[in-house]
Image (cartoon, rainbow, N blue to C red):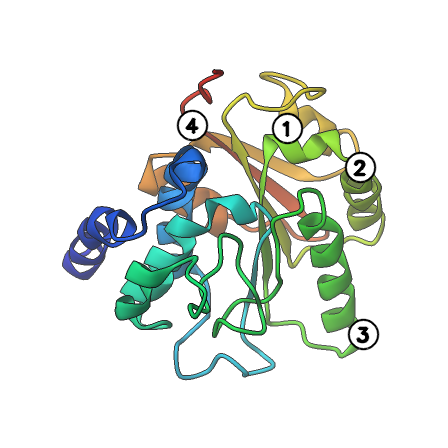
Amino acid sequence: MTATTTTGYARLPALIATMTGDEKHGLAAESTVDVLWVLYDQVLNIRSDQLSDPDRDRFLLSKGHGCAAYYAVLAAKGIIDPALLAGWGGRDSPLGRHPDRVLIPGVEISSGSLGHGLPIAVGVALGLRAQRRTGPRVVVLIGDGELDEGSNHEAIAMAARFGLDRLTVVLIDNDSSTHGWPGRIADRFAVEGWATTTVNGRDHNELHTAFTTPHPGRPDVVVAVTNRKAVS
């Protein structure tokens, strides 16, 4: 881990702490912060001065209720003004409890209604292919609970059949799905022909390796295992 990476990552707890008033989604943010940081700091081709570049990578946050960590990472990377964080969720703030692509620079989709991000990501990957843009990656972050939604399983099957090898799903596994496959989530993707990797969702080196390992001819899923979600 570089000095720049370490310094930037160390800022995230303080940035997240400035966003108060929605503590019920704190665990969702906490479970995604390491994944988000590794993606934005070491993997994705997304720069603050090139947010409209058609050859940029696309990151889609389907797990929109974890947006506090997302906003903190965007602020740390200079994509949004850190001064906005204190007002998040306020009447005049662009930073809602779920992200809005119209109001926030660099946000590709408005999200929060679970189960939409993966199908949209498949469409984005197909659109880029139709434009013959072979460089951009499409990375979508979903939670394991989203596998309760049927639209995701249609997208899983379709992405593999079309060989969308520029598509990566990052699946946060905190054992919160109702109808999922505890301990065997990767199998749901593998049976359809996806490349699969299961890693410690806190280990930056494991995450980086998983995100940068080639998977020619097929999409891939990185299952990032984090702390089990507390049940009240």
Query: Residue 198: horizontal and vertical position, in percent?
Result: 52, 30
Q: Earlier in the sequence, mark 1 or mark 4?
A: 1
Gap in Å between the C-alphas at discs 1 and 4? 15 Å
Image quarter for residue 192? Answer: top right
Q: Is residue 38 above or below residue 55?
A: above
Please tell me whether mark 2 sits on a helix, a strand or a loop: helix
Q: What residue did someone put label 1 on?
A: 186
Q: Residues within 10 Å of mark 1 (few under 14, many from 20)?
A: many
Q: What residue did someone put label 3 on?
A: 130
Gap in Å between the C-alphas at discs 4 and 2? 22 Å
Badge nearest the viewer, 3 or 2: 2
Q: Residue at x 59, y 69 (%)?
A: 136
Badge nearest the viewer, 1 or 2: 2
Asked if residue 102 shows in the view, the reply is yes
Please tell me whether mark 4 sits on a helix, a strand or a loop: loop
Near-viewer residue (133 or 5): 5
Q: What residue did someone put label 2 on?
A: 153
Q: Residue at x 80, y 37 (%)?
A: 153
